[in-house]
Amino acid sequence: MGTLDEAQQLARLMVEIGKGAGRGMAAVLSDMNQPLGRAVGNALELKEAIATLRGHGPADFTQLVVVLAAEMLRLGGVVDETSDPFSMIMWQLESGDAWLKFRQFIQAQGGDLRLIDNPDNLPAASLVSPLDAGQSCWLAELHADTIGAAAVVLGGGRQKKDDTIDPAVGIVLAAKVGDQVEAGQPLCWIHANDEDRLAEATAMVRDAIRISAEPVDAPP
């Protein structure tokens, strides 16, 4: 991965290209060294998105949603420098208005509201295996690219264009970088529908994680 300075330079370049084409532009730099939120996988991520729209999603995912939405309001001319878009957006989440609008989107496109009103009706894996550190520790690293590759091995993504995607499989993180984990507590749960895929993905997830005996600061 590049440095923060390189990312900022690239972001400025992309913004200038867009402005040169007459578009309103903004760039947001976010940490992608570990997965965003806690869910990796199709149905699992949908459950997390539903929870966020209902006002109780993971803090890092909610923060990014709010920041991006605020930029969209600004670019769209809905707010100005005197407005507080963050409070507006949080009110939409906490009041339930964002959730109701999402339901309208699904209904208008002919979707099955029963699946989002009760996410337990979404596809679920037959195997759910916890992965623990085996000792009390702090989570020091959680490589997003390897976690994503493990989800693909489980069947949550395509390795070849004609592969069939399994919407039920994936990984749910119990801890993020900087969190303390006690001995016996899971670092994550791996959702699978095949024993061999589960074994391969488990080894990959172990390789994606580094633990520390000393406290670790959470990334910004």
Image (spheres, rainbow, N blue to C red):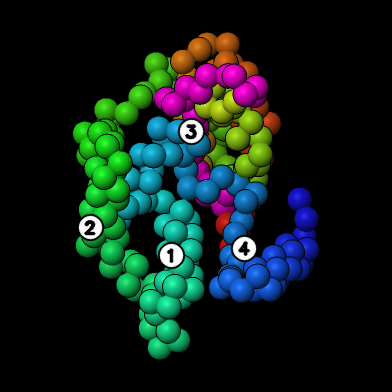
Which label number is shown at residue 41?
3
Q: Which percent across, then down, holds residue 136? A: 55, 39
Residue ID for mark 1:
69
In the picture, measured across the screen, residue 63 lies left or right of residue 56, that is right
**Residue drawn at the location 57% of the way across and 32% of the way down:** 133
Q: Left or right: where does residue 29 sit relative to residue 106? A: right
Packing grade of label 3 (10 A; few <14, some 14-19, many >=20) is: many
Q: Quick one: label 4, few (<14), some, or many (20+) residues within 10 Å? A: few
| Residue pointed to by mark 2 | 96
How far apart are labels 1 and 4 at the CA level? 14 Å
Q: Which mark is residue 218?
A: none
Q: Quadrant of the C terminus?
A: bottom right
- Indicate whether 104 appears above or below 43: below
> Tag 3, which secondary structure?
loop
Residue range of the region highlighted in magenta in the rendering: 159-179
Check residue 125 for magenta coloring: no
* Tag 4 residue: 29
